[in-house]
Every structure is written in structure tokens, then in C-alpha cells.
Amino acid sequence: MRLVVLAAASVIVLSGCTWVSLAPAAKAVRVIPAGAAPAGCDKRGEVSVSVKQSVAFYERNQLKVRDELETLARNEAPGINANTLQPLAEPANGEQRFAAYQCGGRQ
């Protein structure tokens, strides 16, 4: 009986994980390394995103968290007419901020 309860609890806990998909409009959005603002680009604002870093006692893989944060930010960029994102800081507690830019002739 304990095994059944443990298995059911595991399914519930793992179902709390997020899997973020890249929206079609976000495929054209690029992410550049942190640093100086890119030349020839107009700043459109900032994007703040967050995901679950842990679920119950399960600590999520930090590379997966980072990837999902970037994907969420890319999904938000077209809404503010941005085609380039630049992280403003490293992810912390499942959250990250990005500067959003419109660069070159890209839309």
C-alpha cells in the first residue's frame, strides 16, 4: 500500500514541472550575451520571467530552468516589438530579467 501511495505522490509532484514551448513568433528572437547594449538597436523595455525552481522537495535541473526562462522571455519579446534579448543578470530563485531590443531590419 505504501508503494502505491508513494508512486501516486511522485506522479503528482512531477506533474508540477513546467515544459515551456517556443511560440512561432518567438523563433526570430535571438538572445545575446550579457554585457554592453548592442550597437544599432533601439531598447523596447525589459522582460521579467519566472518558472518553478523546485517542486516540493525536488530541485529542478538548473540548465532546464535557465532554458525555460530564456524561452519564456523569447515568447514575450514580440509583444513589445523586440527581436533581441540580453540577460540583465543571472537567474535567481527561478526568475530572470532581460533587456529587450529591436535591432537592424529584423522584425
Image (spheres, helix red, strand yellow):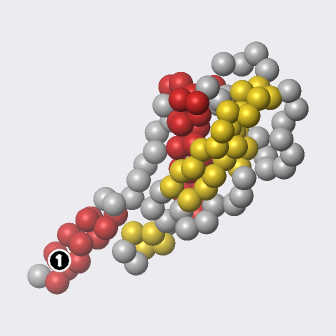
Residue behind mark 1: 5
Q: Relative to 86, does residue 39 appear above or below in the rendering?
A: above
Q: Residue at x 63, y 61 (%)?
A: 91
Q: Position of residue 42 (x, y in %)?
A: 76, 29
Q: Residue at x 61, y 56 (%)?
A: 96
Helix, strand or loop under label 1: helix
Crowdedness of circle 1 by 10 Å Cα count: few (<14), some, many (20+)? few
Q: Relative to 105, does residue 42 appear above or below in the rendering?
A: below
Q: Relative to 4, does residue 20 appear above or below in the rendering?
A: above
Q: Quadrant of the C terminus?
A: top right
Q: How many marks?
A: 1
Outermost residue to the bottom: 2
Outermost residue to the left: 1
Outermost residue to the top: 105
Q: Quadrant of the N terminus?
A: bottom left
Q: Position of residue 48 (x, y in %)?
A: 57, 50
The answer to whether residue 59 is seen in the rendering is yes
Q: Position of residue 99 (x, y in %)?
A: 70, 43
Q: Identity of the amino acid at label 1?
A: Val
- Judged left or right of residue 99, residue 13 is left
- Judged left or right of residue 34, residue 70 is left
Q: Position of residue 45 (x, y in %)?
A: 66, 39
Depth check, front residue: 34 or 6 = 34
Q: Residue at x 46, y 45 (%)?
A: 20
- Judged left or right of residue 34, residue 4 is left
The answer to whether residue 67 is seen in the rendering is no
Q: Residue at x 45, y 69 (%)?
A: 54
